[in-house]
């Protein structure tokens, strides 16, 4: 009996920690240009992100983060990174569309999408959101002089200065070219960029040449 009570307590603790971390993680993913499209690559991830976006806590975190100029600096840095190409080139992988076709024939997928809309607790959260301290604190930030000071000092931020100088750095273009030439960037379609795939086509005679074993040495 004690073991079952302990297991239940641990399970509730883990669920509460996940529920607390979900808005933060989803908000960070939505503000990362290289990871924002990850939700469209996996049906399970799409359901989780949709559920989190329906939670007003995620919108509160997004509002708080979007008032910070450093968030936009990080977004611009990611937008100039070859990680963008690696992220969106995954849409060329036919395996991703196979996952969505399988999800389209799975009733559990539709139920997972409908359940948050049928949860009355979700609507209660939205009704109580205007009285949430996080919403009030976000609104009071408009009266905080440090908020405007951060935006006024943003052009002199070394990170933003480095960002403006990034297009003059040849390494940025080299990294983009390396990512574009890497077959792993394109998933399954990357095999078409592998020279070994076309070895038989480049040398048609190789398919007719059978390997022969070397003759054995005569026995003494």
Image (cartoon, rainbow, N blue to C red):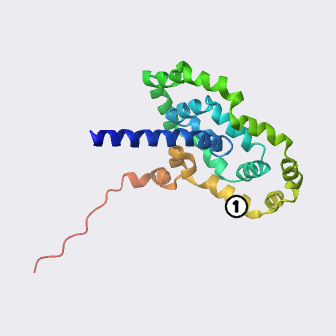
In the image: residue 163, left or right of residue 53: right
Is residue 173 shown to the viewer in this render? Answer: yes
Disc 1: which residue: 174
**Quadrant of the image containing the C terminus:** bottom left
Name the residue rendered at 44%, 22% in the picture.
105
Q: Residues within 10 Å of mark 1 (few under 14, many from 20)?
A: few
Task: Check the image and report above or below for 51 versus 80.
Answer: above
Q: Secondary structure at mark 1?
A: helix
Snapshot quadrant of residue 3: top left
Measured from the top left, where is residue 160 in percent x and y?
81, 57
Task: Check the image and report above or below for 198 versus 27.
Answer: below
Q: Residue furthest left?
A: 220
In the image: residue 152, left or right of residue 190: right
Name the residue rendered at 69%, 43% in the picture.
31
Snapshot quadrant of residue 137: top right
| In-front residue for pair 72/117 | 117
Snapshot quadrant of residue 14: top left
**Quadrant of the image containing the N terminus:** top left
Measured from the top left, where is residue 200 in percent x and y?
45, 52
Is residue 106 shown to the viewer in this render? Answer: no
Measured from the top left, where is residue 49 in percent x and y?
58, 34
Name the residue rendered at 66%, 22% in the picture.
127
Task: Check the image and report above or below for 156 versus 191.
Answer: below
């Amino acid at each position: 009996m004690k073991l079952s009570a302990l297991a239940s307590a641990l399970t509730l603790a883990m669920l509460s920690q996940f529920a607390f971390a979900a808005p933060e993680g989803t908000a960070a993913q939505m503000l990362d240009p290289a990871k924002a499209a990850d939700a469209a690559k996996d049906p399970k991830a799409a359901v989780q992100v949709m559920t989190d976006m329906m939670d007003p806590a995620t919108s509160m975190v997004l509002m708080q983060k979007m008032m910070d100029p450093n968030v936009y600096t990080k977004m611009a840095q990611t937008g100039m990174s070859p990680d963008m190409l690696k992220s969106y080139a995954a849409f060329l992988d036919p395996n991703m569309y196979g996952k969505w076709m399988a999800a389209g024939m799975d009733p559990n997928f539709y139920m997972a999408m409908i359940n948050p809309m049928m949860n009355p607790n979700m609507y209660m959260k939205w009704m109580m959101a205007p009285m949430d301290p996080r919403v009030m604190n976000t609104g009071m930030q408009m009266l905080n002089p440090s908020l405007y000071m951060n935006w006024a000092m943003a052009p002199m931020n070394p990170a933003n200065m480095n960002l403006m100088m990034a297009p003059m750095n040849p390494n940025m273009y080299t990294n983009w070219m390396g990512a574009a030439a890497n077959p792993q960037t394109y998933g399954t379609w990357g095999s078409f960029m592998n020279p070994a795939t076309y070895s038989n086509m480049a040398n048609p005679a190789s398919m007719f040449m059978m390997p022969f074993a070397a003759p054995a040495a005569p026995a003494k």
